Amino acid sequence: MKLKNSFDKILRSKGFKKIELSHVIPSMKVLKRSGDIRRNMFSYYDRNFQEISLRPDLSLSAALKFAEEKTNLKKKYFYSGLAYRKPTKNNDLPIVSQFGWEIFNSKNKHKDDKEIIETSLKILKNTKFKGCKLKIGNLEIFVSLINRLPNLSSRYKDRLVRHFFRKDYFNMLLKKLETNYDIDEKKVVKDKLLANKLRKLNQEEVYGGRSLKSILERFDNKMRSPRDESSKKDVKIIKNFLKIECNIENASNVLNNFFKKNKINLVISDDYFPIDKNNINNVRVFYVSDLGRNVSYYTNMVFSIEVKSKLKPQIYISGGRYSNLLRNLGYKKTEAVGAAVNLTI
């Protein structure tokens, strides 16, 4: 309780307002999103047969509360409480204690991103942890890189961006591009013959929820952009990019040298990241390309603060900028940035 009170004091001094969040949310608000969270929700039906869920994430609840205000003003909120998720691993906890803070309608990205990170560092300073690491990334760089790769079809570019947060599936996509293990040439010939037969049928006929016309259009699109040996080069670039980790002061140089070496038309300015010092109050600061893959709604800057707890590194504070969360929930697009403390450590 003493620790939470010190957090409250820091956030109030920064102009954040404390809000109370409901323990439940209408399930449909989450079901509009992809399946990364809904698979883990604890849900039930109320007396009116409306499906209700225990809040799986406090940032999600805060976003819904902000959307209900229907305001165009910039808002700075903080909150604390419990989040409830079905465990996906044996060591996962079904109930997680969180403390978070958000800036909604954040127009000045650089300024507000910096404020969220600096506030996180100030909160960290009030804890017992020593020898901490601040890791910063930006998903916008990854998306820009993918869109500039010369040998990938637009279909695969879209899939790699969309599934960046699903590591296993993302790696399977890379393997397909690298080895073509999933392509059977004999089956391709048979599929072309079958497609020619189907073109003679009623194109408005529906199969599995899709019209025959749309099925054939998708097939033709695949045939127009087949995978070849050149895609291996792009896979190598992607894998090497995701290995980049360096001091934040060197990030722009390291990235620009990488893009130049691989003939990618992309330049990162020296002031691109909200933090530009390698060490802040004995917290080492790094740029990490492969960061922010655990939360699917982040779109730009992402960060995490790693501490040593029980003799192993654990993420104590994490956050980032998101643009599409509220839009995916059925509201208008809103720029926001926030962070949360994992109080279960």
Image: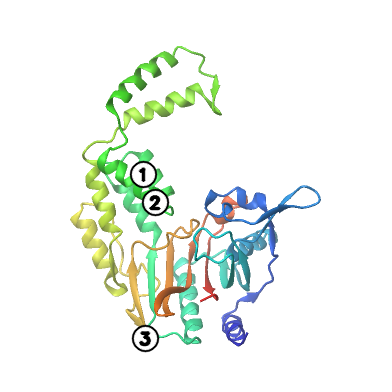
Which residue occupies the extreme left position in the image? 261
Amino acid type of the residue that numbered disc 2 sits on in the rendered structure: Asp
Q: CA distance from mark 3 to mark 1?
A: 40 Å
Q: Amino acid at mark 1?
A: Lys
Mark 3 or 2 closer to N-term? 2
Compute the Cα span from label 3 to label 2. Answer: 35 Å
The residue at which mark 2 appears reads as 168
As drawn, the label of residue 142 is none
Q: Which residue is mark 1?
A: 157
259 with respect to 308 (left or right) = left
Q: Position of residue 14 (x, y in %)?
A: 56, 80
Q: Mark 2: few, some, or many residues within 10 Å (few <14, many ≥20)?
A: few
Q: List x then y, in percent, for residue 56.
A: 60, 61
Quarter of the image where one finds residue 216: top left
Which marked residue is nearer to the observer: mark 2 or mark 1? 2
**SS label for mark 3:** loop
Q: Evaluate whether residue 265 shows in this view.
A: no
State the image coordinates of residue 163 (x, y, percent, origin top left).
42, 49
Residue at (28% x, 58% y) in the render: 241
Check if mark 3's residue and mark 2's residue have beta carbons within 8 Å.
no
Give how far apart the Cα atoms at labels 2 and 1 are. 17 Å
| Number of other residues with Cα within 10 Å of mark 3, as a class: few under 14, some 14 to 19, many 20 or more | few
Q: Is residue 274 visible?
A: yes
Q: Which residue is mark 3?
A: 282
Mark 1 lies on a secondary structure that is helix
On screen, residue 262 versus residue 303, left or right, reads left
**Closer to the camera, 170 or 139?**
170
Crowding around mark 1 (Cα neighbors within 10 Å: few <14, some 14 to 19, many 20+) is: some
Which element carries disc 2, helix, strand or loop? helix
- What residue occupies the far top of the structure in this picture? 200
Q: Residue furthest front?
A: 90
- Which of the marked residues, 2 or 1, is nearer the chain's N terminus? 1
